[in-house]
Amino acid sequence: MSRGTVREALRELQAAGLVDADARGRLHVHTPDDREIAELFQVRGALEGLAARAITGNERRADIVAELRRHLPPASVVGDFSDHMNRDLAFHERMVRLSENSILLDAWSGLQDRMRIIFFARGGDRPSTIMTRDHHLPIVDAIASGDHRAAHDTLVAHMEQAARLWVDAPAR
């Protein structure tokens, strides 16, 4: 691979906020601070809350809820952290995708790499119970109720709890 290709790839990673340059221009993986973590979960809450509200008003809500139930994360935290993280993010992505709002999906997708950095920087060897079925089922139940306010509020509360968890987790 040419140096130019590598430099361009590193520039793209830096533009995405995944790599930082020090005063001498050396690059390293970005380490999010507590404020950035809280803000990222706040934005996710807004985006996913919008998705939840959209689904509650969808005439196919019952089918969408059934699909979300089939894709809930595992019930326990036993196993590989990466697997739990991927299944957790896949559930949230599926919910956003099922809102049928392509701009919302694009905005949410743009946050995935930053979320992965947070997960690995603040807990990358142990799955959290917030990644389990029990913490996601209330979101699905609220969507199933058809109450758009409850669906939104339940999703935002889930993100607020996640933000507290990851902010309080020790940096690696």
Image (cartoon, grey):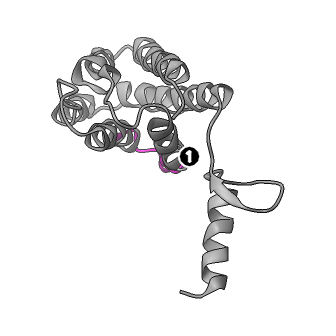
Q: Secondary structure at mark 1?
A: helix
Residue at mark 1: 107
Q: Specify the segment rendered in magenta.
A: 98-106
> Can residue 8 be seen at all in this image of the molecule?
yes
| Residue at image location 32% in from the left, 15% down from the top | 142
- What's the residue type where badge 1 is placed? Ala
| Residue at image location 46% in from the left, 15% down from the top | 161
Residue 144: percent from left, percent from top: 27, 20
Front residue of 130/102: it is 130
Furthest residue to the bottom?
2
> Can residue 16 be seen at all in this image of the molecule?
no
| Residue at image location 35% in from the left, 32% down from the top | 58
Determine the image quadrant of residue 51. Answer: top left
Residue 132: percent from left, percent from top: 26, 25
In magenta segment, residue 39:
no
Front residue of 87/116: it is 116
Eyeballing the image, is 96 above or below 75? below
In magenta segment, residue 103:
yes
